[in-house]
Image: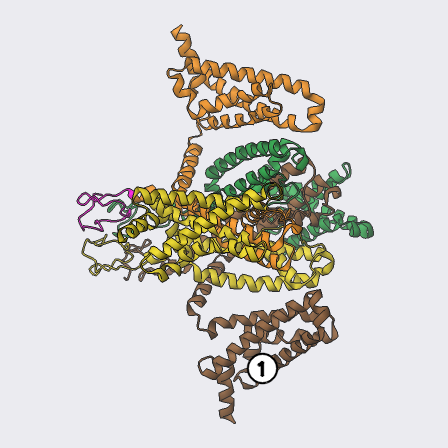
Chain colours: A green, B orange, C brown, D yellow
Amino acid sequence: MNKTKQKIYEIIFEADTPGGKLFDVALLFIIIISVALVLLESVPAIRDNHLQLLHILEWCITIIFSIEYILRVAIVKKPMRYIFSFYGVIDLLSVLPTYIGLVVAGSHSLVVIRILRLLRVFRILKLTRYTEAGRSLAKAIWHSREKISVFIFFVSMLVIIIGTVMYLVEGPDHGFTSIPRGIYWAIVTLTTVGYGDISPGTPLGQFLAGIVMIMGYAIIAVPTGIVTAEIINPTSDKNTQVCPQCLHPSHDDDAVFCKKCGSRLNP
Amino acid sequence: MNKTKQKIYEIIFEADTPGGKLFDVALLFIIIISVALVLLESVPAIRDNHLQLLHILEWCITIIFSIEYILRVAIVKKPMRYIFSFYGVIDLLSVLPTYIGLVVAGSHSLVVIRILRLLRVFRILKLTRYTEAGRSLAKAIWHSREKISVFIFFVSMLVIIIGTVMYLVEGPDHGFTSIPRGIYWAIVTLTTVGYGDISPGTPLGQFLAGIVMIMGYAIIAVPTGIVTAEIINPTSDKNTQVCPQCLHPSHDDDAVFCKKCGSRLNP
Amino acid sequence: MNKTKQKIYEIIFEADTPGGKLFDVALLFIIIISVALVLLESVPAIRDNHLQLLHILEWCITIIFSIEYILRVAIVKKPMRYIFSFYGVIDLLSVLPTYIGLVVAGSHSLVVIRILRLLRVFRILKLTRYTEAGRSLAKAIWHSREKISVFIFFVSMLVIIIGTVMYLVEGPDHGFTSIPRGIYWAIVTLTTVGYGDISPGTPLGQFLAGIVMIMGYAIIAVPTGIVTAEIINPTSDKNTQVCPQCLHPSHDDDAVFCKKCGSRLNP
Amino acid sequence: MNKTKQKIYEIIFEADTPGGKLFDVALLFIIIISVALVLLESVPAIRDNHLQLLHILEWCITIIFSIEYILRVAIVKKPMRYIFSFYGVIDLLSVLPTYIGLVVAGSHSLVVIRILRLLRVFRILKLTRYTEAGRSLAKAIWHSREKISVFIFFVSMLVIIIGTVMYLVEGPDHGFTSIPRGIYWAIVTLTTVGYGDISPGTPLGQFLAGIVMIMGYAIIAVPTGIVTAEIINPTSDKNTQVCPQCLHPSHDDDAVFCKKCGSRLNP
């Protein structure tokens, strides 16, 4: 019994054995098909003609995923740790909406959250270089969190003030029916999205909008500058190691010897 | 009496004592509620149904802020310095619009300026790292002010010329009813906002617009480059080493000898 | 006979002799004219009036290109290598659509692929500095491929989830008729293109859209940061120094000692 | 006589004497007023009511500028050199459109070219730091010219191919009435302007547009990267000076002594 369990564990949780690899790759395909089904079902023309087929496929996949989830919980040594891990939560959220859809109509579209299960692809296919690239990007964004938070805080204040001024200047006649809509317009404009569903109609409003847009030039440069600076000079690489002999600073994290005088660095 | 004053001073101006902290946090909440009220009141559906409630709340908050402002002026040692400080002006502007609104209809929406009072959040909650991040961003933008000013000067000239040419090419039939509108279009296009409320209709106009847009590619790169360069190599870091002999400033951080007179730099 | 072949080879494949240069420059002009013809023919007003003239010119050019292609295949030493080379495929694709157009109507517009033949311009006109600039750009993008792939992978997942949520929130009444359309909207918004053909109509949808747009701020900064970092610090420059003792690669350019084993690096 | 000429020369061409400064500042004001007049005249409401006043003012300014131009030509030592200099051409173009407007209706709006005369403001007001900032920006763009040219060349080819494919996929029903319009759409999309005057209507077209937009992500990063890299590491500063003693490379252009070993650098 224990051996069977060990075997299932290898197949489900690991991707080193042929069986485990096959299981994982098959899972990736089912996830993609499952997401494709949700997309197709939402298209009226397809839904009207193939509703039954889509429902059957959807339930098959949900049952497969449910069995897989139960197996994972049953087989793993620390079930609680798995259940509350990132992938554990994603795995549960991948099946719940279909069951909830039985009660609450429409909610079953939320199974697209299954797409997050694809994140395992990097581990399964051993795309180490991509994992590393992704990690260094995530690190760059993570290290920029304070600057980006402050930036978003200021942009939020700016956007509220701009939205109010434009609401007062333009008024409901040109689509600025309330301050929240003015704020919505300010965000659409400052981020240079510019739908055009609301746009200033009065000369004064257009003049102010022009200033906001040119200001947006400098504003959009800020997050770019933050992230670029982080990617070029990762914070953690800075000054972590100083040579005890020649005191030359800023050695790489993986350096063992000083690159200037050749003496050993402290660990 | 003096002791009471000292106590009030601690509560209102400082955030180190429990009382002061409580006061400041309460204030932050009232500010947020107050801004939310203004946003809600501007929504027609909400204004029509809850006008009286909103007015009462608005006046309660205004009176709280008024009392607070008077207290601040009364308690501080140098009232004039507070009144004309950044926060002093903001605090006054946070209550004025409601009173002015009694005379001039509609102007009371300007109380959203209260949102700027939230800037105190960093000091109150001791978000030092965020304050620092904000300061370094502000410094990067401040050090770029000359380049950005020159950039905006050139963009302004460019936009006036492009706007005039498009006005002559497209004419009033395609929405270019005047040169200012042409300039508005040029700004909307160069900043890549692109509402689409005015867009070229003639083949020649579309050809010119295409050139303007591709030019905009290179143009949008300029402020990004300026700010990014400032964040990566802050200007102030260049002046850290001054030659003790010839006093030549701005040596590189890793320079050992003065690049002008050849004498050794202090470490 | 062999001498004639050699002569033709020089004229067609090389650009060093006066004849070869003349041939190549003439070819560049014919390519540009040919692409211009396709563009003009697609304009209804021009097609209706000059259809016959355009067809005659199109066929003349196609015959010239066909003869040239046959000559290239006949004259080159390794025909197979030419046929399956980048330029060989382009040269073939430059004539095929006209012939296919005899059978399948409309497909002959695909001859615009001829524009890719213009890539030879750099070699022909000896624009070495431009070739080099192009190569360094291509290298920067190529070295960023892993980061950009991971980035596009995450953006794809994000866009599917955002598209689904907006489809559920907004529904068919505001243009979100299906999840794929929601995804289309999410791409249009996140990339800051913002057509405005679909835009959120409900307050909740506009609120979510605002968050997506501000998120887009940070997201658009990522590829810029990746490419900028690559252009500033090309990856290949990091591997210039290899330790002669432990063969550890990728030392900094200014390193004097190996950071792994401490032995002196060759200058 | 010669002395008068010298005096006038000082007033018109120089900004060091009080008279010269006054003349230049007055000129700046007249230029701004003159451009404002052209903008105002193009607004229908203003033109209809104040046409005569605007015409009189316009002619006054043109006569002032004409006299100034004749004076400049008469007073300068090498008239030909002035006439064909950048400012000489601008000065002439600033008056010509008004005279041409007597014959060709509407063309007089081109006097907005006068705005370029404002470029003198930096020299007149001795805004040296701004001139320097402008020069370093211009240098960064100038040094990037090869990369930007190659970039625009590739984008042009890309845009022609994308425009043709979208014309074939979408057809005239969704606004893609000709290939040039398809190319216009491709430019509007790739640059993230996104007017929405033409937008894909078929599912296949929207799918392709989605790919084009995500591709545009990486593409918009390229010019930003180019310009940013130039601003951070100006090309001319690279490797120009190598120390003859210790061979340390990459000294600043203005360095006289090696910053590593202190020996004199060759001029």
Q: Secondary structure at mark 1?
A: helix
Residue C214 is at least partly visible in this image: no
Residues rendered magenta in the picture:
B239-267
Residue at 41 percent across and 60 percent down: it is C236
Pinpoint residue C219: horizontal percent, then vertical percent: 54, 46
Residue D141 is at least partly visible in this image: yes
Q: Is residue B157 above or below residue B66?
A: below
Q: Main secondary structure of the magenta part?
A: loop
Pinpoint residue D43: horizontal percent, then vertical percent: 60, 44
Residue at 82 percent across and 50 percent down: it is A48
Q: Residue furthest front?
A: D1
> Given the image, on which type of amino acid does mark 1 rest?
Glu
Most foreground residue, A143 or D265: D265
Q: How many marks?
A: 1
Pinpoint residue B197: horizontal percent, then vertical percent: 64, 46
Is A36 left or right of B22, judged from the image as shown? right
Q: Is residue A197 above or below residue D84?
A: above
The residue singled out by tag 1 in the image is C68
